[in-house]
Amino acid sequence: MKIVTLSFRMSQELRKRLEQTARTLKRRKNWIIIQALEEYLQKKQRAAVQVNARRQSLLAGGKPNADGEFWVKQMDSSGWK
């Protein structure tokens, strides 16, 4: 895996909290940022999978409701119903 360098801005307060946490954990700031970003992205991915599963369940159930009608409008489900 190729490693890349990124640059971003953060508030002074957040920087201070990051530095304090790094000292407390005896870890590098880079490690903390990567761990936090990995966790955040995993949560977002799981949430997206859950939304998609709910959408498919509502459409497959064939029961009309507000959620189902919304999702029917969002995509063509004729190929798998």
Image (spheres, rainbow, N blue to C red):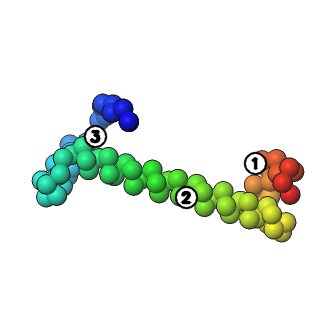
Q: Say whether disc 3 or disc 2 marks the residue closer to the N-terminus.
A: 3
Q: Residue at x 82, y 51 (%)?
A: 77
- The local crowd at label 1, few if under 14, some if 14 to 19, many if 20 or more residues have their Cα within 10 Å, is few
Which quadrant of the figure contains the N terminus? top left
User: What's the residue at 80%, 63% (across, down)?
Assistant: 60
**Element under disc 3:** loop
Image-based side of 5 in relation to 46, left or right: left
Amino acid carrying mark 2 in the image: Ala
Q: Tell me the distance, in whole angstroms, between the alpha carbons under discs 1 and 2.
A: 18 Å
Q: Is residue 58 above or below residue 9?
A: below
Cβ–Cβ below 8 Å for labels 3 and 1? no
Q: Say which of marks 3 and 2 sits in front.
A: 2
Q: Amino acid at mark 3?
A: Met
Can residue 66 be seen by looking at this rendering? no
CA neighbours of label 3 inside 10 A, class few (<14), some (14 to 19), many (20+) = few
Marks 1 and 2 in Cβ contact (< 8 Å): no
**Which of label 1 and label 2 is nearer to you?**
2
- In the image, which disc is placed on residue 47? 2
Say whether disc 1 or disc 2 marks the residue closer to the N-terminus: 2
Compared to residue 4, the image places residue 21 above or below, namely below
Q: CA distance from mark 3 to mark 2?
A: 26 Å
Depth check, front residue: 70 or 60: 60
Q: Which residue is mark 3?
A: 10
Q: Is residue 79 visible?
A: yes
Q: Secondary structure at mark 1?
A: helix
Q: Which residue is mark 1?
A: 74
**Residue 28 relative to residue 62: left or right:** left
Give the spatial CA distance, label 3 vs label 1. 36 Å
x%, y% of residue 65? 79, 66
Which part of the image, by quadrant, shows the C terminus? bottom right
Q: Would you say 41 lies left or right of 31 here?
A: right
> How far from the left and from the top, in percent, is residue 53?
67, 61
